[in-house]
Amino acid sequence: MTTSVRDVPNVERTPRRTVRVPDELWQAAQRVAAARDESVTDVVNRALEAYVRRHAASSSQSDSPSTGSSSAPAADSSSSTG
């Protein structure tokens, strides 16, 4: 089952995030999301959930005190915000 932002209680309390996305990609995402009766927020949330599920296990295995690896998701260090 897919959870839509519209289905999340207290959605108005969900913090806003700022990311940089090329115009062409953003516009394409808007078109596809609208055609599927979704918001781009729905799409981004699902994509981030899938990313974390896919990489969390391998990330936790490589994180150990001896390596000094950060437990912060890779997306935070590679995306521009602001």
Image (tube, grey):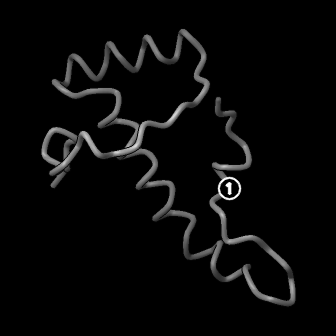
Residue under the image location 15 percent in, 38 percent down: 6
In this picture, is 72 found above or below 15? below
In this picture, is 71 found above or below 31? below
Residue under the image location 61 percent in, 25 percent down: 20
Q: Position of residue 22 (x, y in %)?
A: 60, 16
Residue under the image location 75 percent in, 70 percent down: 70
1 left or right, relative to 15: left
Q: Position of residue 7 (x, y in %)?
A: 13, 46
Residue under the image location 50 percent in, 63 percent down: 54
Residue picked out by circle 1: 74
**Helix, strand or loop at mark 1:** helix
17 left or right, relative to 65: left
Q: Quadrant of the N terminus?
A: bottom left
Q: Quadrant of residue 19?
A: top right
Q: Quadrant of residue 82?
A: top right
Amino acid type assigned to the residue bearing label 1 in the image: Ala
